[in-house]
Image (spheres, grey):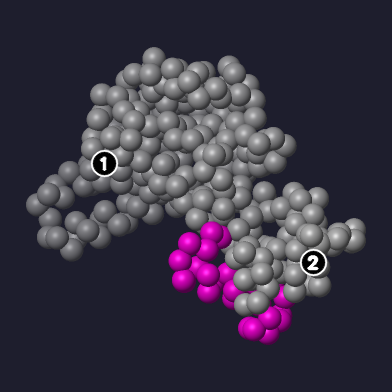
Amino acid sequence: MDTERRLERYRAADRWPTEEALGAMLDNQLGAFFAVRQALPALTAAVRAAAARLREAEGRLVYVGAGASGRLAVQDGVELYPTFGWPHGRLLYLMAGGEAALVRSLEGAEDDALAARALIERHGLEAADVVLGVAASGTTAFTRAAITEARARGALTIGIANNPGAPLLTEAEHGVLLHSGPEFLAGSTRMTAGTAQKIALNLFSTQTMTELGRVHDGLMVNVVASNAKLVERGRQMVQVITDCSEEQARDAYAQAGHDVKTAVLLVDGLSPGEARLCLARAGGNLRLARDIEPDPIRET
């Protein structure tokens, strides 16, 4: 596997001056960017399929992985609620070794295919769900078993791996190859392979949420206002989108319960009930909701 090979040009790096070694590590990271760039067609297909599946039904977005790859996958997933308001109930993390493996290395857990199948069954994965498996080698037994079992149950499956010909890429319905090549430190896929995975995961989740209507004009309009900074950010978004005054934006945002989309429609002249109905009819897409002619609604 490419990710296990040693690069001869770095063979003596442990004897290099510190700055030279760091520079070489950084240079090797450039391969992560190019790997993701080459994978954009496959990543595009995966995003479109995931957004379509999650739009059609109240399915879950499921992250699967082991070791460093699993930790990166979970890290991406936990940002979806605060950033995009993606419900906790529609997120699931299947990490080899469980939550303990997030903070402690439990590498043997990656070989437990039976545990992966049991988790898929326990959580009742089905056709409405989207399952994303990440493994640098593309051979990890836990991740592969979860993907094959989920696919057999009708779930949409996506596999991300860093080695050409990795079985995970064909076992998933959508295979995304991030061909990042050998590492500065042979076999340490937390480095360039991990960087490529982080970039790809960022792109995947952000664009999926965008296509689900949770981004408007480059703004995180579903952001959860969980602290003073985010409350102020939400107020600013209302003002920017509607070009209203600061006071009007603040009042509408407060009346909307710190929901940016509802607040925008209140500034547009709708009542709270009309705003909620228009958003529901538009599937949560603010741009579409602003184009809907609301039916008169009697406030109670």
The crowding category of the residue bearing disc 1, from other C-alpha atoms within 10 Å (few below 14, some 14 to 19, many at least 20), is few
What are the residue bounds of the magenta stretch? 223-249
**Quadrant in which residue 189 is drawn:** top left
Q: Residues within 10 Å of mark 2 (few under 14, many from 20)?
A: many
Residue position for label 2? 271
Report helix, strand or loop for mark 2: loop
User: At label 1, which amino acid type do we have?
Assistant: Val
> Where 218 falls versus 31 (above or below)?
below
Q: Residue 46, how many percent across, how many down?
A: 61, 38
Quadrant for the C terminus in the image: bottom right
Q: Position of residue 107 (x, y in %)?
A: 26, 29
Quadrant hosting residue 250: bottom right
Q: Main secondary structure of the magenta part?
A: helix
Quarter of the N terminus within the rendering? top left
The disc placed on residue 9 is none
Can residue 226 be found in the magenta stretch?
A: yes
Amino acid found under the numbered disc labelled 2: Ser
Q: Nearer the viewer, mark 1 or mark 2?
A: 2
Tell me if residue 79 comes above or below residue 256 in the rendering.
above
Residue for point 64% across, 71% down:
253
Q: Is residue 123 left or right of residue 153?
A: left
Q: Nearer the viewer, residue 208 or 140?
A: 208
Circle count: 2
Q: Nearer the viewer, residue 175 or 54?
A: 54
Among numbered discs 1 and 2, the one appearing first in the sequence: 1
> What is the CA distance from the residue labelled 1 to the residue labelled 2?
48 Å
Tag 1 secondary structure: loop
Q: Which residue is mark 1?
A: 103
Q: Is residue 26 visible?
A: yes
Residue ID at (38%, 49%): 195
Residue sitting at 50 percent across and 55 percent down? 82
Circles 1 and 2, Cβ within 8 Å, touching? The answer is: no
